[in-house]
């Protein structure tokens, strides 16, 4: 497991869509600094590892994200030097129990139990020199072979170097720390009003990294 997991909300299209569902505009604070939460780094699962259905939810969702992994210890890292601290990139599925998430976040804290049960990473780590143009990466989500989402990483508002600069201000980053980009626009069931069910196979594809595959199983199957 990585020493820490931070997940951002860095795509404007995504926060615009989710804010609209709540009948609200994008908070002006979102444009001032990269916003993130700290996830549960001890419940990370790898590729092809089944996801046991989390108790208490009827709205299980996937989230299509790119993640970067920190490769060097650093603190107070300026944006112009931040790329030198990235060891590589992988695919991230920030699974969410939407009904639980929205209930707990109505108290203006979290997310917590709505996301703590699992985050998937994989299938491998690709070094920065293996990706010619990060912004050109196409991000695709399929459920049972049917395409549900497609986006482009280049639509991101807050870059990984900007995230690194922000987080490292007065705080030390360590090798293995994971930064999730947040969901690409249209990259989750919440935005399209479709949710997962037991038995579904979720595939997130970002080439040249590959395909991150997860099957959702019932709680009894998952132990």
Image (cartoon, rainbow, N blue to C red):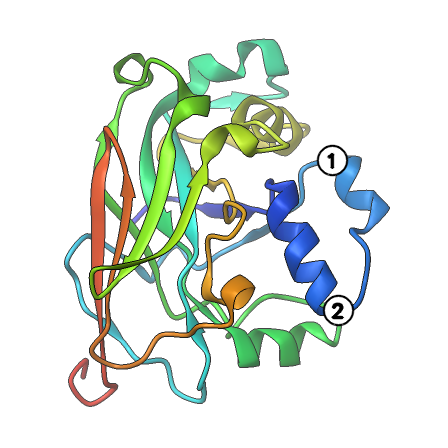
Left or right: where 144 falls relative to 104: left
Q: Residue furthest front?
A: 146
In the image, which disc is placed on residue 14? Answer: none
Q: How far, Cα to Cα, is label 1 from label 2?
A: 18 Å
Q: Where is residue 113 drawn, in percent x and y?
A: 51, 74
Q: Secondary structure at mark 2?
A: loop
**Relative to 106, does residue 85 appear above or below in the rendering?**
above
Left or right: where 102 falls relative to 38: right
Q: Where is residue 36 drawn, in percent x and y?
A: 61, 47
Neighbor class of circle 2 (other Cα within 10 Å; few <14, some 14-19, many 20+) is: few
Residue at screen point 25% across, 16% down? 130
Residue at screen point 55% across, 80% down? 100
Q: Nearer the viewer, residue 175 or 102?
A: 102
Residue at screen point 20% across, 60% down? 145
In the image, which disc is placed on residue 33? Answer: 1
Left or right: where 160 falls relative to 201: right
Left or right: where 51 falls relative to 62: left
Q: Where is residue 162 drawn, in percent x and y?
A: 62, 25
**Relative to 145, does residue 152 appear above or below in the rendering?**
above
Q: Nearer the viewer, residue 101 or 137?
A: 137
The answer to whether residue 86 of the structure is visible from this angle is yes
Q: Secondary structure at mark 1?
A: loop
Which badge, 1 or 2, is on the more N-terminal residue? 1
Residue 161 in which image quadrant: top right
Q: Are marks 1 and 2 in contact (CB under 8 Å)?
A: no
Q: Where is residue 211 drawn, in percent x and y?
A: 21, 45
Residue 165 in which image quadrant: top right
In the image, which disc is placed on residue 108? Answer: 2
Residue 84 in which image quadrant: top left
Neighbor class of circle 1 (other Cα within 10 Å; few <14, some 14-19, many 20+) is: few
**Relative to 151, does residue 165 appear above or below in the rendering?**
above
Q: Nearer the viewer, residue 36 or 48?
A: 48
């Amino acid at each position: 497991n990585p020493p820490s997991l931070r997940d951002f909300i860095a795509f404007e299209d995504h926060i615009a869509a989710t804010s609209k569902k709540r009948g609200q505009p994008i908070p002006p604070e979102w444009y001032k600094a990269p916003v993130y939460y700290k996830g549960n780094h001890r419940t990370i699962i790898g590729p092809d590892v089944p996801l046991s259905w989390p108790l208490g939810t009827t709205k299980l969702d996937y989230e299509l994200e790119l993640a970067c992994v920190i490769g060097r210890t650093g603190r107070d890292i300026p944006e112009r030097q931040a790329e030198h601290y990235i060891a590589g990139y992988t695919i991230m599925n920030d699974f969410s129990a939407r009904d639980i998430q929205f209930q707990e976040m109505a108290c203006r804290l979290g997310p917590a139990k709505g996301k703590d049960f699992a985050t998937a990473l994989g299938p491998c780590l690709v070094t920065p020199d293996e990706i010619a143009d990060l912004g050109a990466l196409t991000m695709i989500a399929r459920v049972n072979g049917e395409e549900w989402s497609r986006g482009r990483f280049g639509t991101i508002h807050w870059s990984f170097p900007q995230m690194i600069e922000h987080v490292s201000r007065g705080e030390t980053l360590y090798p293995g720390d994971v930064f999730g980009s947040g969901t690409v626009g249209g990259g989750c069931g919440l935005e399209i009003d479709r949710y997962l069910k037991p038995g579904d196979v979720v595939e997130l594809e970002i080439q040249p990294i590959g395909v991150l595959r997860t099957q959702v199983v019932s709680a009894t199957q998952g132990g």
